[in-house]
Every structure is written in C-alpha cells, then in structure tokens.
Image: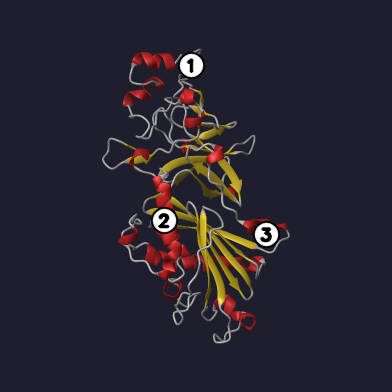
Amino acid sequence: MLKNFWYAVEFSDKVTTKPERLTVLGQYLVVYRTPKQGRVVALSDLCVHRGAALSGGTLKDDKIVCPYHGWEYDPDGQCTKIPANLPGRGIPKKARVDSYPVQEKYGFVWVFMGDLPEEERPPMPVWPEFDDLVENGGKFRVVTGEFLWNANYERILENGCDIAHAPFVHAGRFGNPDMPQVPDYEVEHPDEWSAFATVDLHPPKPSGLWGKFGRLVGNDLKKRPPVTTSAGWMLPNMIKLHVRLPIGDMIIYDTNIPIDETHTLVKWVALRTFFTGKWADKDAINRTMRIFYEDAAVVDKVRPELLPFDLGAELHIKSDIIAVEYRRRRQELADKGWLLNEEDFITGDVPRRTATVIPSPARRESPELARAWVHKARGEHPTVAASRLMGGDESGSEANEENK
C-alpha cells in the first residue's frame, strides 16, 4: 500500500457535522465537517489519552470532543482542553493527534496520507469531465456508488486496466467471447503518475435498455464498427475507463480505497453523454454494479492475494503491458520509501493486532514537536507505554517538564 498520495476517501455530500470513521491503508481516520467554517477535517481516530475512538464523540464549535474523558481537539489535532485538569494545569505537548491535509474536488473528499511538504506532494489527478456536467449546463450525466471487495486493491487496479478479461468475465455485456483478441497498443503516459491503453474492441449484441435502442447502435454485429476503449491507472489507487460508443461516451472513475491488504472499498463515479435524463440513472447504476459483481467473482479468489514484486513471479504477455507498467512504477516508489512497511505499524499486546501509523506533515513541519507524539511508527522512536502517562517520555522528570 502506498503512502504520500492524495486519496479520495468519501463523497463530499456524505461528510457532515456528525463524525465518521473511515479506514484507509489500515489506519482509522475520523472525518467531519466543522459547523462554523464548513471545513472538512481528517484526524487520526485515536485519542492519545486512553485510545478511545474520536469518531464516537461530538463536535463543540469546530473541535471534536472525545467520548471517553471529554478531551477536545482542534482541526489541527492539538488538544485544547482536558476537563480533568485542575485550573492552571497545562496541557502536555503530546496531547495531539495527526491531522491530515484535506481538499474537496470532483465531488470527493481527498486526504493526503503522508508527511511530505506541500511542494513535494504528487498532484491530484485531473478529471476533466467534471467541468462539463449536465447540472452545470454541460453534457455529462453522473451517477455514483460504492462496492466492497474481499481483495487487494492492486489486484483490483490491474483488473480495471485489463482489456483481455472482458470477453470472458463480462461476456455478452460488453465483452465479445467470439472476438477476444487484443490489438497491440502503446502505453500512453499523460504524466509520471498515470498510464493508459487505447484499443478498438468488438462489442457484443446490446441488451436491456440499450437493446431497445438498437436502431441507434445497430444489432447486426457484422455491420457494427469497433468501439474505441481506453483503460488506465492513476496513482495511487484509481482507474479510469472510457468507452466511446456510437451513441456517446461512457466514463467510469474508480477510487479503490485500501481498507487493509485484502479488503478494498471502491467508490465510483459513472458519467455518460447519452440518455442524460434522470429516468436512465437506475439502469446506469445497475449496469455498473453488475460489472463489479462479475469482476469480484473472479478477483476475490485470485492467489496470491498480493501482487508479487518479482516480475518473473507471474507470466506476462503483450496485452499485459499496462499492468507491467504499473508494477514497474510501484517498484520505483517502493525504492523511494513510499510503500508501507513494518515500520509504519505499531503492535499491541494481543498477537497479530496491529495499527497503521502514517506520520502527518506536522511531524516534519514542526521540529520542536519531533518527539511530541504518543503514537509513533516503529521507524520514528520505540513505543514506550509509559509515554502515555501524563504525556511524557520515559523519565518522570521530562514528563513533568512537558506538563508545565
């Protein structure tokens, strides 16, 4: 799983003043919208006092209140009030949680899961169709949804870019098993963070709602022209599928949110330039969901569950170039230290119970707070149970100093 990227984690209209727990890269986040400013906040969902989930708390002005002992945290993750303290007693420097950068774009809340300074962060992807939506006088009609996979997000990512599986997994829907050949293609790189393949495919006979409009697309397969289709990946976890049908364009964006190594929550957006009335939305949603169910029936059972790092561990052919490009790029990022590894986890007393700790930018931006973190990844400092006591480190004297 890759850190140091923007992740689209939730639809914007789902984020309210009621705190919500999200799981991204194995890490619990609490996400909410502040009542005063309407700003979306993403904090680590773990109070540093006794480990309670802040998502179970409430908002007080623009601060979140822990449900266990009432500690209050501002949007930057700093504790501003400890109700149990006597008047005049200070708040420890370590009374703080990670706060992650947030942006809203394309109808999503995006959270930067990493500690890179702003100028070093990879950009969010460009989804140009969102500048041309029907509700704003444009040509694209949008429907959205989500789907839970019991599979690794990288396996799902490769499946979404895999052109050769359509005639078999989606036979009769948009894959034609009588013409499964994949033409040779060149991988297109719009930037260093994405790659696409464009080919001409032969579609099957239309069915359902589209079949009723056969006069527009033609039901004689011999006379129907091939359909130009583009599929590709956008780092760290997104897929774009663009199908250029005779009646218009269909585009699907998937953001494959890694819950953990073997579970993925996909939030998707489907856009179309045909049948743009609300009356066709239900059919568009159903068709998209059927595609996911067909894919999941295969991908959920793929073994090994995780992509191997050795390119020679699985067999590749010419039509797999887009996937090979992804694996090579992933290796480059792993070599930069952007892949989550054992140093990004802390382990509790119960065997096999671990939690992700992805440092936020504040850990780099504020050198004076370099040691002011209770929940540290193993790569920072050893986790010391005593550090929870009064917000200090191993020595009681240092703890007393930080409490002043």
Tag nearer the camera, 1 or 3: 3
Q: CA distance from mark 1 to mark 2?
A: 51 Å
Instruction: Tell me which amino acid carries mark 3.
Output: Leu
Question: Residue 38's x, y, as percent?
Answer: 63, 39
Which residue bears the numbered disc 3?
Answer: 133
First in residue order: circle 1 vs circle 2: 1
Question: In this view, which residue lies farthest toward the right?
Answer: 137
Amino acid type shown at disc 2? Arg
Answer above or below: position of 259 versus 155. Answer: above
**Alpha-carbon neighbours of circle 2 within 10 Å: few (<14), some, or many (≥20)?**
some
| Residue 237 shows up from this direction | yes
Q: Secondary structure at mark 2?
A: helix
Within 10 Å of disc 3 (Cα), the crowding (few <14, some 14-19, many 20+) is some
Q: Looking at the picture, how far across and down is residue 267, in whole percent?
A: 51, 55
Q: Which residue is mark 2?
A: 328
Kindly identify the residue that appears in the image at 60 percent across and 65 percent down.
Answer: 281
**Mark 1 and 2 residues: CB-CB less than 8 Å, in contact?**
no
Q: Residue at position x 43%, y 62% from top?
A: 323
Compared to residue 288, the image places residue 310 above or below, namely above
Is residue 156 toward the left or the right of residue 193 in the image? left
Query: Mark 1 highlights which residue?
Result: 90
